[in-house]
Image: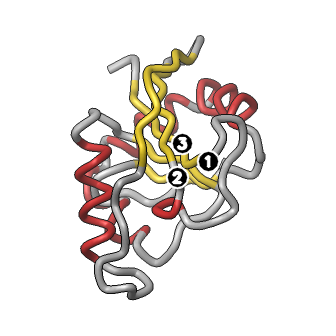
């Protein structure tokens, strides 16, 4: 594997949201490798909290299904809520220190081997902080 699909939680395509990953208006999907990142598409977050309960497992399942349908393997945001314990079983979860997606793309490319190693751990993954 030398390329991986990544979804960024955003409202504007330039910066991360300042809310939990599942609360983004959009997910911008890129395919990255160690040298570059290619924008693939933007998808709208159509999943709402069914029970209006914090850490709703149905919301986590809906977000995961939405992103898995797009072939996403890595999810990136500044914040994740309690559902990270469910999401990391299906994705590599990355918490970014930087606010901008462009700067974060460079960091992901530079750390691609670390991301691949975490992906290989399957349901025993831990989240990464970059």
**Helix, strand or loop at mark 2:** loop
The residue lying toward the viewer, choosing from 28 and 32, is: 28
Query: Which numbered mark, 2 or 3, is in the foreground of this view?
Result: 2
Query: Which numbered mark, 1 or 3, is in the foreground of this view?
Result: 1
Above or below: residue 9 compared with residue 52 = above
Q: Report x, y in % for residue 111.
A: 60, 32
To which residue does mark 3 refer? 8
Task: Give me the C-alpha separation between circle 1 and circle 3.
Answer: 10 Å
Task: Give me the C-alpha separation between circle 2 and circle 3.
Answer: 11 Å
Q: Which sits earlier in the primary sequence, circle 2 or circle 3?
A: 3
Which circle marks residue 103 in the picture?
A: none
Circle 1/circle 2 CB separation < 8 Å? yes
Q: Residue at x 60, y 32 (%)?
A: 108
Q: Residues within 10 Å of mark 1 (few under 14, many from 20)?
A: some
To which residue does mark 2 refer? 25
Q: Residues within 10 Å of mark 2 (few under 14, many from 20)?
A: some
Above or below: residue 97 compared with residue 33 = below
Q: Residue at x 40, y 73 (%)?
A: 83
């Amino acid at each position: 594997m030398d390329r991986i699909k990544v979804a960024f939680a955003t409202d504007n395509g330039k910066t991360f949201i300042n809310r939990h990953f599942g609360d983004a208006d959009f997910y911008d999907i890129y395919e990255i490798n160690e040298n570059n990142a290619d924008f693939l598409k933007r998808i709208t977050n159509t999943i709402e909290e069914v029970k209006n309960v914090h850490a709703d497992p149905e919301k986590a399942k809906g977000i995961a299904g939405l992103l898995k349908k797009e072939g996403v393997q890595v999810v990136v945001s500044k914040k994740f809520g309690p559902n990270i314990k469910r999401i990391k079983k299906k994705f590599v979860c990355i918490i970014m220190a930087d606010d901008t997606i462009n700067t974060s793309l460079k960091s992901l490319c530079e750390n691609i081997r670390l991301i691949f190693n975490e992906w290989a751990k399957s349901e025993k993954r831990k989240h990464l902080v970059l």
